[in-house]
Amino acid sequence: MSDNSKKLAVADRHPRAMIMAVVAIVAATTALAGCSTASSTVAQPPTAKLVRMPGSSEPSVVLTQLGAERIGLETAPVTIGRDGEATLPYPALLYEPNGQTAVYVATGTLTFTRAFVTVAAIDGDTVIVKTGVAPGDRVATDGAEELLGVQNGVGEET
């Protein structure tokens, strides 16, 4: 008997065993295919969103705790300068595509509203502003650019 006829003879005598072997191989292959190291395609909840607050014409950016951590969010107070003007740290100052200057003011827990400011002068790391914020306001410094990106619809994920 040739080698092929021996194989056929085994298959003829044990068809159930052959079917079970094929099923086992298919099951193992399917199970291993699910063990991929690629990231999950399950949508994660957004880490930032725009919300219209009552009484405000400007929508606010509301972050989750994870969103704040991802952008390295830090804030600083608007202070009173030598001549009584409002001052803020330079990293808080943002430029809109049209050249307009803005900052993000904390208006609640992990909630920031864009305020357009009029800059009087920049002195090193300090911005002196004429209008738009008041001493005591807290402005976003680290992470401010990402807030602007959420506001302008750039980079949907934070």
Image (tube, rainbow, N blue to C red):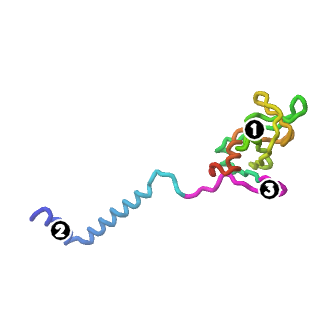
Where 112 falls versus 13 (above or below)?
above
Q: Which residue is mark 2?
A: 8
Which residue is under mark 3? 53
Tag 1–tag 2 contact (CB < 8 Å): no
Q: Which residue is mark 1?
A: 93
Q: In the structure shown, which secondary structural element does the residue marked by tag 2 occupy?
A: helix
Question: Magenta residues?
Answer: 42-58
Q: What amino acid type is highlighted by mark number 3?
A: Met
Q: Residues within 10 Å of mark 2 (few under 14, many from 20)?
A: few
Between residues 18 and 85, which one lies in front from this camera angle? Answer: 85
User: Residue flagged by tag 1: what amino acid is it?
Assistant: Leu
The type of residue carrying mark 2 is Leu
Relative placement, left or right, of 3 versus 146 is left
Pinpoint residue 143: horizontal percent, then vertical percent.
69, 41
Residue 49, given in percent of the width and then of the height, sits at 70, 54
Q: Earlier in the sequence, mark 1 or mark 3?
A: 3
User: Closer to the observer: label 1 or label 2?
Assistant: 1
